[in-house]
Amino acid sequence: MRVLTWNLFHGRAVPDRPYSLLEAFAGTLAGWEWDAALLQEVPPWWPAPLGRACRASARMALTSRNLLLPLRRAVAQRRPDVIKSNGGGCNAILVRDARIAEHRVLTLSRCPERRVLHAVRLEDGTWVANLHAQGPDRLARADVALAAQTTLAWSSGAPAVLGGDLNLTRPQVPGFDVVAGHGVDHIANRGLLACGPSTIPQRGDLSDHEPVLVALRKEAHDEGI
């Protein structure tokens, strides 16, 4: 299973462009090879069209700055460079070539910003969880610890992946092995093995975060070897 994590910077580029970049992000994501994509800082109206462009199932969980969302959206669709993060936000999980059997969401905090953990259970029993932790480090560590504990409880011993923007450069993820990362974006897993080193797909000037991609496989004893 190839897992990607990417913070979409609220659909913006560096330098900013004064128009919607939905098609650019959708085309870029669609062109990469992955099975599960963990996305953060996603405009809330993007998960469905991103899923269609990538031929993937999409699940989302709202995060912060979504009050009066229709007004925020109206500005963000025209001038994302002006409204920036105030356009509204969500986390999204996209899954290709596998059925999503279950989707769960846990609110980690409401102040100063709403942060959530959300996860999907795939048809083979594997759980894939997505997190955008708070800053500074103290709050980020608390979010990561609670997200790890919750993902382990939800998965009940099944293989699990926990990734996203952890807001830590060297995170400790209790119960998981961190197998890929760049900056504050990381992928950790339990019951799976990395098939090789992680890679950073080319994103051009989209977002201010690098995407991180890693291939994982089940451990030998889970495959009956």
Image (spheres, helix red, strand yellow):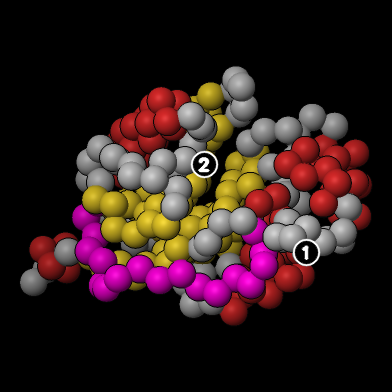
Q: Is residue 154 visible?
A: no
Which portion, as a residue range, is magenta? 190-207
- Residue that numbered label 1 is attached to: 21
Give the quarter of the image for residue 197: bottom left
Q: Classify residue 103 as left or right of residue 169.
A: right
Give the amino acid at mark 2: His
Nearer-the-camera pick, 181 or 154: 181
Tell me residue 83's x, y (percent).
Answer: 83, 43
Residue at (38, 31) in percent of width and height: 141
Tell me residue 200's x, y (percent).
Answer: 46, 69
How far is mark 2 from mark 1, CA to CA?
21 Å
Give the quarter of the image for residue 54: bottom right
Q: What element carries label 1?
A: loop
- Using the image, tell me which numbered label, if any, was put on residue 8: none
Which quadrant: the N terminus?
Answer: bottom left
- Residue that numbered label 2 is attached to: 132
